[in-house]
């Protein structure tokens, strides 16, 4: 009989609050402020900070920081607006830094 296993999840590294599903990863090839990062289509149990414009290698973006809603640990950011046409796919997507999340149900 096969074991029933729940969905593979990512959680806050500080408190264990679940913040994203593995199935929502769009790309594993992003760079965060201090480590590699994943681009997710959705995130949960987070708080968005103030919007600000940031210059990245790929151009100017408006982003909002992402914090864990339980412990307030900074996890990454959400792309609010991309000014370059080729980067529009990032709008509404979430960057979670690999060093700030842990895997569960693997």
Image (tube, rainbow, N blue to C red):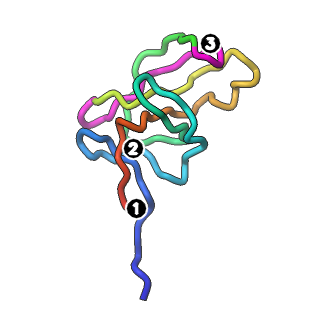
* For marks 1 and 3 on the same chain, the one whose residue lies earlier in the sequence: 3
**What residue sits 55% from the left and 46% below the top?**
25
Please tell me whether residue 62 belongs to the stretch shown in magenta. yes
Could you tell me residue 66's position as x and y percent? 41, 28
Name the residue: 43% across, 83% down.
Answer: 2
Q: What SS does tag 3 mark?
A: strand
Q: Residue furthest right?
A: 85
Residue 72 higher or lower than 84, as above or below:
below
Between tags 2 and 1, which lies in front?
1
Label 1 belongs to which residue? 106
Inter-mark Cα distance, 2 to 3 = 26 Å
Where is mark 3, residue-wise?
60
Residue identified by numbered label 2: 19
Badge 1 local density, few (<14 within 10 Å), some, or many (20+)? Answer: few
Q: Residue 56 at what x, y percent from top left?
A: 58, 16
Pick whichever of labels 2 and 1 is earlier in the sequence: 2
Please name which of the two marks, 1 or 3, marks the residue nearer to the observer.
1
The answer to if 81 sits in the magenta stretch is no
Separation of disc 1 and disc 3 at Cα? 36 Å
Magenta span: 56-72
Q: Are marks 2 and 1 in contact (CB under 8 Å)?
A: no
In front of the other: 52 or 22: 22
Front tag of 2 and 3:
3
Look at the picture and state if 54 lies above or below 80: above
């Amino acid at each position: 009989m096969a074991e029933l296993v729940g969905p593979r999840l990512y959680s806050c590294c500080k408190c264990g609050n679940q913040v994203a599903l593995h199935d929502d990863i769009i790309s594993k090839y992003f760079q965060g402020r201090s480590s590699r990062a994943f681009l997710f289509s959705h995130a949960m149990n987070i708080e968005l900070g103030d919007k600000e414009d940031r210059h990245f290698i790929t151009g100017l973006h408006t982003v909002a920081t992402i914090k864990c809603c339980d412990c307030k640990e900074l996890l990454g950011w959400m792309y609010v607006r991309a000014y370059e046409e080729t980067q529009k796919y990032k709008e509404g997507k979430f960057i979670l830094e690999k060093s700030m999340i842990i895997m569960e149900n693997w």
